[in-house]
Structures are given as C-alpha cells and as structure tokens.
Image (cartoon, helix red, strand yellow):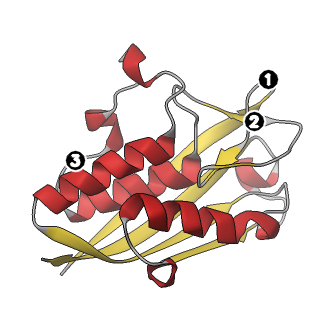
Amino acid sequence: MRIGHGYDVHQLGEGTKFVLGGVVIPYDKGLIGHSDADVLTHAVMDALLGAAALGDIGQHFPDTDETYRGADSIALLREVCRMISEKGFVIGNIDATIVAQAPRLSPYINKMIQNIANACHVTIEQVNIKATTEEGLGFTGSMLGIAAHSVCLLNNK
C-alpha cells in the first residue's frame, strides 16, 4: 500500500464560478485559477499522483498550457485515475478536508463525494469529504481564498 497527500489553495475573486468537487455552488465570489480552480479536486489529484510517485498536477496539467484553460477538474481527475491504474494501483480510500470560512458547504458534500467517486471508479464509501473553518483566522478565515487537503491510500492491483 502507498499513501499520498495533496494540498491546494485558490484565491477568491469576482466574475468566476465557485466549483468544489465538481459542484457549482451559488456564491457571490468564485475561485481564481487557470482551470476551473476546483481546489478540492486538485488536492485529491495531487494525493493520488503523490501516492503513485507520478509527480503533481502542475507537471501533468501545467498552467502554461492553454489546453487546460478553464478545464473541468473532474475530467482531469479521471485522467489521473487512468494514470495510476496504468501504473498498477487501485484506490483504497480518499479523505479530504476543505478549509473555507464561507459559504456553508454541508449541503453540497454528498454530491462532491459522488462526483469524485464516479471519476475515480470507486464507491462512495471509499471517499470522505469534510469542511471546516479557521474561525476567522488566516487567509481562509479572512475569506481571501479556499484551501483543501487530501490523503489517499493506494493498493497494488
């Protein structure tokens, strides 16, 4: 078995969609990035790539490549899952934490779990997502950005 950790952060700003785990969430701000800036899915991808010793998402989907401008991160996650499968691994589980002061994310967590499980070809019981605040502290507490951490376990096929 192999364990991976992923972390990502994106700044909040005007005029963009707020996408987490492939779910478009109604909010007056969005996440800024080269792709759809889905900070949760990016952290999951980095955890999976790390566990498989395949580098990181910047190596596979660089922000200098216009191909990935506005890219759907769930589609990129499918590609990451294909890569780890080719390397001989299956996903044991994925656990992730979103750090955001606002908006309230609990109504969207189950759909995020479903989207990530579907993209990874695993059951919803293999994916856990939770959200927390930083009680007004730091850049997330000041609502300047959103962060996400993820860990995963990969097993040999």
Q: Is residue 134 at least partly visible in the picture? A: no
Q: Amino acid at mark 2?
A: Gly
Q: In the drawing, does residue 81 fall left or right of residue 105? A: left
Q: Nearer the viewer, residue 70 or 49?
A: 70
Which residue bears the numbered disc 2?
30
Dot placed on the residue nearer the N-terminal end, 3 or 1: 1
Please identify the quadrant where the C terminus is shown: bottom left
Report x, y in % for residue 51.
24, 65
Choose the circle earlier in sequence order: 1 or 2.
1
Q: Secondary structure at mark 1?
A: loop
Residue holding disc 3: 55
Q: Give the labeled residue for mark 1.
A: 15
What x and y, as percent, mark residue 64? 37, 17
Tell me whether the residue at label 1 lies in contact with that at label 2, contact meaning CB atoms closer than 8 angstroms: yes
Quadrant placement of the N terminus: bottom left
- The single residue placed furthest to the bottom in the displayed view is 125
Residue in the foreground of this view, choosing between 114 and 127: 114
